Image (tube, rainbow, N blue to C red):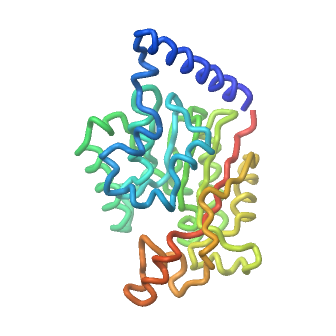
């Protein structure tokens, strides 16, 4: 981890020097490249940006220590690739972006269709997404998300409950975290955002609600070899009681209950979420 921190401390120094050179009339590639906020505010994200008030992409990615020359894997971007819209353009010039998607041969039409819609999205805007490498992730069968030991970061947003609930339980979650561990370099970062179940609620409530105990996620990550570095409350939502008739999907953006209780759920906003930063030890 010290190696990575030294690397990016040097990069900050280099960027500062580049700004001084720009003021003197010398334009460098570092100055010409887009900042994280530039990408977040770019017009290509206009349809997605209404979720920013709930998902805090800038603060979240800064907490995970994202830098533009990193090799980054996003797990299960889904059809819309909400975070991919930020990560792919930000990493295109200097870094590497892997989108670990659903299995193209999945027996579930939802997974097949989501992957294809995501690929269609990439193909429709090559100026943003031509450098994206799509891999396949479906633990425990498909786990080669990037070359072993090559990634600086693996990021997963609101996915742990999917592996837990879809017939795999702890074994499938552990297989996922083990895949992340293999893909990362020593000192690499695993960033996890997940719907948060209060620790006072029974573990059985994780079975169908979409919410997970923070202690469970930490235990699975540590069992795979990770060490917890830090937790952030950037994606916390105190207004979310987590007790809803359709679990987390009662809330926006899903609003599974239709018009019943819709106004109340809109006032709550998106779910209360844990934001965890792990490291693969040196």
Instruction: Report the side of 195 relative to 73 (left or right).
Output: right
Q: Please tell me which residue is depicted at 58% across the width and 42% down the height of the picture.
A: 62
Question: How far from the left and from the top, in percent, is residue 178?
Answer: 64, 49
Q: Nearer the viewer, residue 16 or 246?
A: 16
The one of 96 and 57 positioned closer to us in this rendering:
57
Q: Is residue 279 above or below residue 166?
A: above
Residue at 41% x, 38% y is 38
- Position of the C terminus, as image quadrant, is top right
- Counting labels gives 0
Q: Position of residue 171 (x, y in %)?
A: 65, 63
* Residue located at (50% from left, 16% from top): 18
Q: Residue at x 71, y 74 (%)?
A: 198
Tell me the quarter of the picture where residue 148 sits: top right
The vertical placement of 97 against 220, above or below, is above
Q: Position of residue 47 (x, y in %)?
A: 32, 57
Q: Nearer the viewer, residue 63 or 148?
A: 63
Instruction: Give coordinates of residue 226: x percent, y percent.
Output: 73, 46
Query: In the shown orientation, is residue 70 left or right of residue 274?
Result: left
Is residue 225 toward the left or the right of residue 63 in the image? right
Residue placed furthest toward the bottom: 260
The relative height of residue 14 versus residue 119 in the rendered view (above or below) is: above
Res 186 quadrant in image: top right
Q: In which quarter of the view is residue 243 placed?
A: bottom right
Residue closest to the far left = 124
Above-or-below relation of 56 to 5: below
Quadrant holding the N terminus: top right
């Amino acid at each position: 981890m010290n190696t990575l921190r030294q690397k990016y401390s040097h990069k900050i120094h280099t960027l500062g020097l580049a700004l001084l050179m720009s003021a003197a009339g010398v334009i460098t590639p570092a100055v010409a490249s887009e900042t994280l906020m530039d990408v977040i505010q770019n017009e290509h994200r206009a349809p997605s940006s209404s979720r920013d008030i709930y998902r805090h992409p800038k603060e979240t990615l800064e907490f995970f220590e994202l830098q533009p020359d990193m090799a980054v894997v996003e797990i299960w971007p889904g059809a819309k690739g909400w975070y991919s819209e930020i990560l792919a353009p930000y990493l295109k010039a200097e870094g590497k972006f892997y989108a670990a998607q659903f299995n193209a041969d999945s027996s579930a039409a939802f997974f097949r269709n989501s992957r294809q819609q995501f690929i269609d999205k990439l193909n429709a805007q090559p100026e943003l997404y031509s450098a994206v490498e799509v891999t396949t992730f479906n633990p425990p069968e498909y786990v080669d998300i990037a070359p072993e030991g090559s990634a600086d970061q693996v990021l997963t947003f609101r996915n742990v409950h999917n592996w837990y609930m879809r017939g795999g339980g702890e074994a499938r979650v552990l297989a996922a975290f083990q895949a992340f561990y293999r893909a990362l370099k020593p000192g690499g970062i695993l960033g996890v955002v997940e719907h948060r179940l209060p620790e006072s609620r029974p573990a059985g409530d994780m079975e169908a609600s979409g919410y997970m105990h923070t202690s469970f996620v930490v235990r699975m990550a540590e069992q795979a070899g990770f060490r917890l570095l830090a937790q952030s409350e950037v994606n916390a939502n105190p207004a979310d009681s987590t007790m809803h008739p359709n679990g987390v999907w009662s809330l926006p953006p899903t609003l599974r209950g239709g018009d019943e209780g819709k106004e109340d759920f809109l006032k709550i906003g998106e779910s209360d979420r844990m934001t965890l930063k792990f490291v693969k030890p040196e």
